[in-house]
Image (cartoon, rainbow, N blue to C red):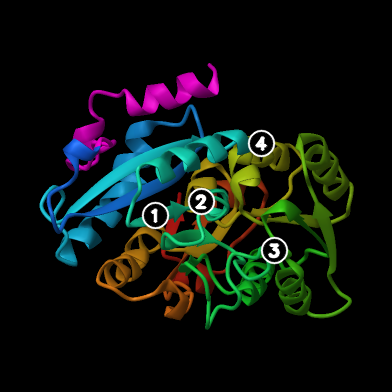
Amino acid sequence: MSLAQKRDYIIGRRDFIAMAGGAAVTWPRSPAAQQPEGVRRVGVLIGLDLPSSVNDLLMGKLLPPYQDAIREAGWIEGKNIHTAFRFAASDSPASYESTAVEVMRLAPDLVFAVGLRSAQAVQRKTQSIPIVFTRVADPVGLGLVASLGHPGGNITGIVTGELSMAGKWMQFLLRCVPQLNHVGVIYNPASGPYGAAMAAIGKAAGGPGVTVIEYRVHNEGDLAAALSSVGQQPRGGLIIVPDPFTDALGAPIIAQAARLKLPILFPAEEMVERGALISYDFVPDDMMRLPVTYIDRILKGESPANLPVQAPARYTLVINLKTANALGLTIPASLLATADRVIE
């Protein structure tokens, strides 16, 4: 299926309007068909891993929390706000670029960019239309904003968490598997400079007892080599830094880790459902609800330059006991008691 066919598949779904709660796929473009006075226009750019379930992505995880928050803020679709959703194929930089151009052609009052690539693509297209992003790990390191406290420019938003929280990943992995002495950290450097995260992971490893091995993966070949390398280490384990690349390859990563008997921390609840051992990550709903605070304030006249980038306040710990049993691990009762969800 071509990228164009993938987009047509999503946008052409007959149940899309119902899933989107009545929000528009597009709005009239001609001068004679302008929106009623007072109606604000918001363009939303989202990257989707296809052929994932549209129902699952749109109904279950992405749009409902956003739409609930918009309504709670007093914005009623078709009355005082009109929303246009656009989707890019997350495995295609060209798809993001062309879709961002589409969003700009709609002349929105604000763009809501879900994910790093969405934010980068939209920022390359405008320096004046306000942008609110979400699900971005390091907006300063990637040049989206000047600083977290004072973004400057036309963009602000919500990060996935402080980079120092990566130390928690190591702490939780070691609590599950205290005998580890080699931990491979796999990440895609195109998603950001992860120096602060690596420093936090190294500090949490607790000295010379655990060797932390950094793997920068740019493609599937790099990833296969990294997994093989960690698998050759005695008492090895894995931490996967989530981003569009590693998320898209989550299933084969988890399958290979299982074959190599490697315990894996993959910060995404759905990855633990697929067989990763443990996840510690932001609450997904918050990534769609929190940005609405800024969307509301900007549409009412505030500047994104003056709105500090925020981090989520809530995180969730998920453990897969099936995977633990398959690896011959006994998870401490104290850790299970603190987990938000245990998969048995």
Spatial CA distance of label 3 from label 4 is 19 Å
Identify the amino acid type marked 4.
Ala
Q: Nearer the viewer, residue 162 or 276?
A: 162
127 in relation to 269, above or below: below
Spatial CA distance of label 2 from label 4 is 35 Å
Relative placement, left or right, of 266 versus 50 is right
Return the residue found at the far bottom: 149
Give residue 273's position: percent from left, percent from top: 49, 45
Identify the amino acid type marked 2.
Val
Give residue 199's position: percent from left, percent from top: 77, 75
Spatial CA distance of label 2 from label 3 is 42 Å
Q: Nearer the viewer, residue 314 or 130?
A: 130
Q: Quadrant of residue 72?
A: bottom left
Q: Which residue has dot 4 on it?
A: 255
Q: Which residue has dot 3 on it?
A: 177
User: Which element carries disc 2, helix, strand or loop?
Assistant: helix
Disc assigned to residue 122: 2
Spatial CA distance of label 2 from label 1 is 8 Å
Q: Is residue 90 visible?
A: yes
Identify the amino acid type marked 1.
Val
61 in relation to 26, above or below: below
Give residue 233's position: percent from left, percent from top: 88, 52
Q: Which residue has dot 1 on it?
A: 111
User: Which element carries disc 3, helix, strand or loop?
Assistant: loop
User: Which element carries disc 4, helix, strand or loop?
Assistant: helix
Give residue 184's position: percent from left, percent from top: 79, 57
The residue that appears at 82% across and 35% down in the rendered structure is: 221
